[in-house]
Image: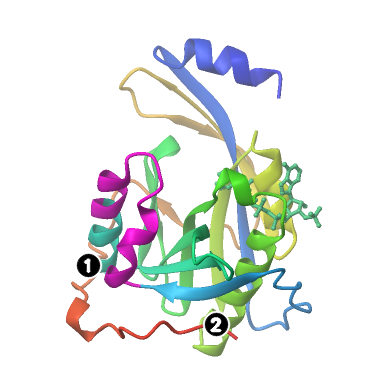
Amino acid sequence: MLLCPVRKLLQPVVDFGSLVFFERDLRQRLAQRPPAKGFIAREAYAVDLDLLNGMEDSAARKQAALDRLRRGEHWFVGIDSRTGELANYRWVSYTRGFVPEIDRYFVLKPGEVYIYDLYTLPRFRRHGVDAFVRHSVYSYLQSTGINKIYAYVQGSNVASLRAARLLLRPLGRVWYIRAGKHPPILIGARKAGFPELRHDPAGAETPLRDLAGNSWVSRVLR
Ligand SMILES: CC(C)(COP(=O)(O)OP(=O)(O)OC[C@H]1O[C@@H](n2cnc3c(N)ncnc32)[C@H](O)[C@@H]1OP(=O)(O)O)[C@@H](O)C(=O)NCCC(=O)NCCS
């Protein structure tokens, strides 16, 4: 934690930190789902982009979301069931994932997914929405035949590390240091089962998703 202010100060010249990688084997049963506490978990589509309206940089966020949907990624949200507001979201990639801190890509095998860009809007934090949506998404993925989830969390992000540990198993921590535009240096033991991280996406291009084929009826995750 003490590293954080030092890191911010040095960031334009040199960036360093650690990333904790996690996995979930979905062939094993999930623990009981936490209570919904007034939230609905569902998949979201292009028609739902206005959910991002209240957020900072909403136009850029909408464009990024559209690009991701076009790449075939899936968007899952937690909605306040009283007001319909967006409370939480996460993205799921079925082919690969970029890890910007270390300039590497996860390369996924069939049946594996990478979950990223997980967020609870500040006014909804510590109300259990992440725990509820996380469980709903994992159990939905399990029901569609996915057997492995990968994710990573910055080593200094205490809230997210704790939230991740509720359903994910840590695979190891990688430290990185990068000076200016030089490639990052990685340090850290990687246990068996550690995901493959490559410099290039290895041609794992995702087919464009047919947005017109998306269901316009929201599918609530059960
Ligand atoms: C991490 C984050 C998604 C958690 O969302 P949330 O909806 O507040 O989480 P929940 O209320 O469902 O809490 C689930 C568990 O996370 C942990 N947790 C959440 N916030 C925490 C905090 N501030 N400090 C310590 N642990 C925390 C707890 O273990 C909690 O379980 P508990 O309440 O039974 O103790 C949210 O803090 C967030 O969006 N942070 C900013 C963005 C971010 O860091 N994203 C993750 C990038 S990898």
Label 1: element kind: helix
Q: Is residue 93 left or right of residue 192?
A: left
Q: Is residue 59 above or below residue 67?
A: above
Relative to 131, is 205 on the left or the right? left
**Residue located farthest toward the front when viewing the structure as drawn:** 83
Relative depth, front residue between 76 and 57: 57
> Does any portion of residue 16 appear in the rendered image?
yes
In the picture, the quarter occupied by the N terminus is top right
Residue 53 falls left or right of residue 143: left
* Picture quarter with the C terminus: bottom right
Q: Is residue 173 above or below residue 81?
A: above
Determine the residue located farthest toward the right in the rendered image: 32
The picture places residue 95, in percent across and down from the top left corner, at 35, 68
Indicate which disc, 2 or 1, sits on the residue closer to the N terminus: 1
Residue under numbered circle 2: 221
**Residue 69 position in % (x across, y down):** 28, 67
Please tell me which residue lies in front, 49 or 150. 49
| Residue at left offset 51%, top offset 83% | 220
As drawn, the label of residue 70 is: 1
Q: Is residue 40 above or below residue 186?
A: below
Q: Gap between marks 2 and 1, in whole Å?
A: 22 Å
Q: Which residues are magenta?
A: 45-63
* Magenta stretch holds residue 53: yes
Give the camera-side residue of 99 and 139.
139
- At a point 51% along the width and 81% down the height, the residue shown is 146
Residue at 70 percent across and 54 percent down: it is 163
Query: Along the horizontal axis of the image, is 214 left or right of 108?
Result: left
* Residue 168 visible in the snapshot: no
Amino acid type assigned to the residue bearing label 1 in the image: Arg
Q: Secondary structure at mark 2?
A: loop
